[in-house]
Structure formats: structure tokens, C-alpha cells
Amino acid sequence: MLDDEIWGDVGCFLDSYVLAESQDVVVIAYSAESRNAAAWIYVALKQRGVCAATVCMVALRDPEFAQRLKTYLPAPISLPGRLLIITLERDTLSHSNAIREAIHNFEQARCVVLRLLNAGPDLFRGPLRLSPSEIAARNAIWS
């Protein structure tokens, strides 16, 4: 259930990791068990003036996913800003080859893929409040 804490953490995720701007093309691909988290990201982007498309996928085996994903991608030459693909799944990181194939003609510097694993109800209850640099600093302590 969406509450103020989750909504704030969705905003932190967008501010620290996604950094989407109005000219960017955003595609949110999600598995059924991550539907709520995908919807929260979609609504938060929309409130910020960033359009996004959503694509449902079946984890691991979804032969039509690649084609569904490609229908939301512009021609690389007409990409107005960056291409941002956000995937949300509960237990796996599926369809890596399909995603790689879909973006291979885009300029690498203008293409960002964010893969969220364990994207269930608790995804936005704290972990993504940390910035990428804070996470890197914490990981450095343990390595």
C-alpha cells in the first residue's frame, strides 16, 4: 500500500538514480509481482512532466517481450534526450539479451538501463534513500 514513506522514497529514487528530464524517453518494464512499484514510478514521473511507457513482461520466458519493448523505442536518430529503461522484477533479472538487442543501435552515452531486483512492496522502504555514492562508500568498507 502506498504511503508517505514509500512516495518519498520513490522521489529519492528518481532524484538520485533516474534523473529523468522531460525530453527523455522512459520505458518501465515490469513483471506482474512488481506492478505496484512500476505504477508508483510511472505516476511520479508523470507528475514531474516526464512521459513514460509501461511494458509488462513474464519473468524468464516471454518470447514476445522483445517486440513489445521495441514498440516503445524511437528510432535512434530521433531520440530527443536520453533513453531510460527501468526494469522491475521480484526474483530474477530476465530478458537481458532482449534489452541489449533493443538498445544496441542507440548511442551508449544516451542510454541508461536500471534493473531493480526484489521489486516488491519493500523496495521503496529505505534502501533507495541512499545515493549511489553513499552505497559505493558503504560497499568499499566491506570489500
Image (cartoon, rainbow, N blue to C red):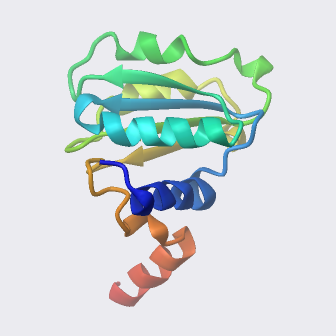
Quadrant position of residue 87: top left
Name the foreground residue: 71 vs 41: 41
Residue at the bottom extreme?
A: 141
Quadrant position of residue 15: bottom right
Q: Residue at x 64, y 40 (%)?
A: 47
Question: Where does residue 132 sit, x and y in percent of width and height?
Answer: 53, 68
Question: Where does residue 6 sit, x and y in percent of width and height?
Answer: 40, 57
Name the foreground residue: 14 vs 95: 14
Q: Quadrant of the C terminus?
A: bottom left
Q: Is residue 26 left or right of residue 88?
A: right
Residue at the front extreme?
A: 3
**Is residue 81 among the parts visible in the rendering?**
yes
Q: Residue at x 37, y 67 (%)?
A: 127
Q: Is residue 73 left or right of residue 82?
A: left
Question: Where does residue 42 sit, x and y in percent of width and height?
Answer: 51, 35
In the rendered image, the vertical position of residue 53 relative to residue 44, given as above or below: above
Name the foreground residue: 30 vs 64: 30
Instruction: Count the labels in the image.
Output: 0
Question: Where does residue 66 sit, x and y in percent of width and height?
Answer: 41, 16
Q: Residue at x 60, y 18 (%)?
A: 73
Q: Residue at x 65, y 29 (%)?
A: 51
Quadrant position of residue 53: top right
Name the foreground residue: 4 vs 68: 4
